[in-house]
Amino acid sequence: MKLLTVLMLIALPLSCFAGSGCLLFEKLMDHTIVREVGVDMYLQEFQDFIDDENTEMALEKVKQCFFDQEDKTLTNVLDMTVISISSLSAFNPLDREKQAL
């Protein structure tokens, strides 16, 4: 289940291109990292993506994991998120279509 959650968090930015302003990913990261958002509010915000009890438990554990981290670690996670999204501009499908022509 942990692997599934990690893969989900890794795959989410792939559906958003750099500079596109993927609001879903930004909302997910903000709600996951910000301590003011409690576990109940976190689960309520993403209820549409929770199919079963196991998914709900996994999201609770992810949120709790971020609750237990130091502020510096949370800042580093946000920085890495920005870097990973920015690097996706190299994979813009429009560029690949131009190269194929």
Image (tube, helix red, strand yellow):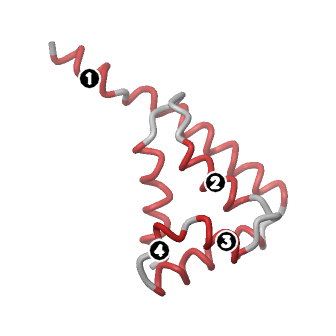
The type of residue carrying mark 1 is: Arg
Instruction: Please tell me how crowded label 4 is: few (under 14), some (14-19), or many (20+) other residues with Cα within 10 Å.
Output: some
The type of residue carrying mark 3 is: Lys
Q: CA distance from mark 2 to mark 4?
A: 17 Å
Q: Which of marks 1 and 3 precedes in the sequence?
A: 3
The image quadrant where one finds the N terminus is: bottom left
Q: Which of marks 2 and 1 precedes in the sequence?
A: 2
Instruction: Please tell me how crowded label 3 is: few (under 14), some (14-19), or many (20+) other residues with Cα within 10 Å.
Output: many
The image quadrant where one finds the C terminus is: top left
Q: Are marks 1 and 2 in contact (CB under 8 Å)?
A: no
Camera-nearest label, 2 or 4 = 4
Give the percent coordinates (x, y) of residue 50.
47, 74
Q: Are marks 3 and 2 in contact (CB under 8 Å)?
A: no
Q: Position of 89 compared to 68: left or right?
A: left
Give the percent coordinates (x, y) of residue 22.
52, 40
Q: Position of 89 compared to 37: left or right?
A: left
Q: Is residue 59 above or below residue 13?
A: below
Q: Which mark is residue 96?
A: 1
The type of residue carrying mark 4 is: Ile
SS class of the residue under badge 2?
helix
Camera-nearest label, 3 or 1 = 3
Q: Is residue 91 above or below residue 51?
A: above
Q: Which mark is residue 29?
A: 2
Q: Which of marks 1 and 4 precedes in the sequence?
A: 4
The type of residue carrying mark 2 is: Met
Q: Read off the residue under disc 4.
A: 50
Q: CA distance from mark 3 to mark 2?
A: 10 Å
Instruction: Please tell me how crowded label 1 is: few (under 14), some (14-19), or many (20+) other residues with Cα within 10 Å.
Output: few
